[in-house]
Image: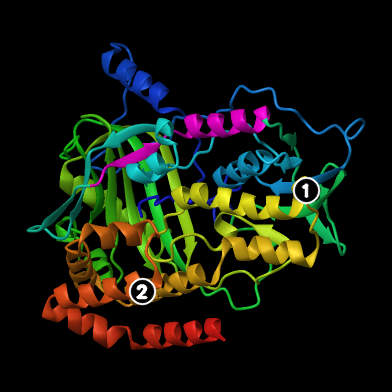
Amino acid sequence: MGTLLGQLSSAFAPPKNKFFGSPTISFSSLKSQHSLSRKGTHQKVRISKFGNFLDLKPESQPEFLDFELPLYDPSCDRSHFDVIIIGTGPAGLRLAEQVSLHGIKVCCVDPSPLSVWPNNYGVWVDEFENLGLEDCLDKTWPMACVYIDDQKTKYLGRAYGRVGREKIKSKLLENCLWNPVKFHKAKVWKVKHDEFESAIECDDGSELKASLVVDASGFASTFVEYDKPRNHGYQLAHGILAEVENHPFDLDKMVLMDWRDSHLQNEPYLRVKNSRLPTFLYVMPFDSHLIFLEETSLVSRPILSYMEIKQRMVARLRHLGIRVKRVIEDEKCVIPMGGPLPKIPQSVMAIGGTSGIVHPSTGYMVARAMALAPVVADAIAECLGSTRMIRGRPLHDRVWNGLWPNELRRVREFNTFGMETLLKLDLNATRGFFDAFFDLDPYYWQGFLSTRLSLRELVSLGLSLMLGASNSSKFDIVTKCPVPLARMMGNLALEAI
């Protein structure tokens, strides 16, 4: 949600990094720049007219971390590793960190391994606390809120945080260097497989071999195979980190969803379309003048027009009285959600966006990738550790099934059913759904958003949701979900065979 983080790939974005085409700077430097712009007496500030920020260009520039990486040198290093990881995004670096803890030889291949990630990652604070990563958050809010409509607001007693992109990447890189992990600055063009090893060919002409190749390069990858049509839903968002004259949001709350549509009263065309394919606003207020705002389509198929997303956001900010002085960063977020899992097993392992771990109903992935990487690393170590050497098809079986055991596949089917249901809901039905959802026992709604519930618990959640929903919401869900429900039941039956 929002950039729910929005986990994270390069398939549908400008070619820079994953789904986000914007450059990035650290939160501390943002605060510094923000203070200077307010105090400086000679700085010329161009303020957006009537809330239309689209004519303001983002000011930030790409940043790179200051690390001396142990680079692969073909003249003196062996070209064979235990594991090669393609990509140094959050999932790839986390896996490299965890695998190398077992003494396994790892090489990460990425054309720009020191680039600071441009993604604005949001997570629930307890998720990162459970992983020992709370020091990687650069801003937290003690609670979140959801605006159902102009009359009703839900207050969620669960702390939310913005991930410090420099902090988390620096921490993962430091751990990789300590272990140590090799890095190769190149783009992978091709992956080849023999019975017991795989090889990658890079754009610099080099060839590296390993017992296992892991693809962590994102949704755009062509290295991971699917044996079913990829009928994804898509989460689409446009976000800006901006300096504004002022804004109406409480500083101690982040806004998870704002489903209000009063900003479209004078925009009949946009209002009609929003009533059918609704979008919401996601907000991280840093102070009275620095704020991250993102207009988001939770899920659509086919994908909603990106220009319409921006037009709705312009109308919303105008209605809220938010005048943008500077756009520090902007980002386009496109996240494929749901759809089939990759072919299991196969010769290339996957982690991150291309592995199917994005939450099908929300778009969350980052915290889950951080949590699953140690699980995958343990499965790899069982096969390639110092006392054992299991390679080829047995290795692929164990690692893929370590990531996707049967229970998690069934849980994903239920979550995909949730996505398919959301695809069929208009604005009023969506409001009714989330009104009932956030009235559930926190154990259920928090567990659902964090992918912590078993299939049995998810069924209980569904029943509780139906019991607590209004009559109109029950009618919407019952009349619009039979086909997704039948599809889920069929897929669960196939999984059980």
Whether 220 is among the magenta residues is no
- Identify the image's colour scheme: rainbow, by chain, secondary structure or one colour: rainbow
Residue 216 seen by the camera: no
Q: CA distance from mark 2 to mark 1?
A: 38 Å
Residue 57's place in the image compared with 483, above or below, is above
Residue at image coords 53%, 72%? 406
> Does 362 sit left or right of 189 as displayed?
left
Q: Main secondary structure of the magenta part?
A: helix
Q: Disc 1 marks which residue?
A: 387
The one nearer the camera, 142 or 41, is 142
Q: Disc 2 marks which residue?
A: 456
> Does 286 sit left or right of 109 as displayed?
left
Residue 279's place in the image compared with 160, above or below, is below
Residue 173 in which image quadrant:
top right
> Does 182 sit left or right of 143 as displayed?
right
Residue 308 seen by the camera: yes
Residue at image coords 22%, 73%? 465
Q: Quadrant of the N terminus?
A: bottom left
Q: Secondary structure at mark 1?
A: loop
Few, some or many residues within 10 Å of mark 1 (<14, 14–19, 20+): few
Q: How far across and how far down the image is residue 45, in percent? A: 31, 24
Residue 400's place in the image compared with 472, above or below, is above
Q: Quadrant of the C terminus?
A: bottom right
Q: Nearer the viewer, mark 2 or mark 1?
A: 1
Q: Which residues are magenta?
A: 158-178
Residue 58 in which image quadrant:
top left
Whether 176 is among the magenta residues is yes
Residue at image coords 23%, 57%? 442
Mark 1 or mark 2, which is nearer the start of the sequence? 1
Q: Amino acid at mark 2?
A: Arg
Q: Amino acid at mark 1?
A: Thr
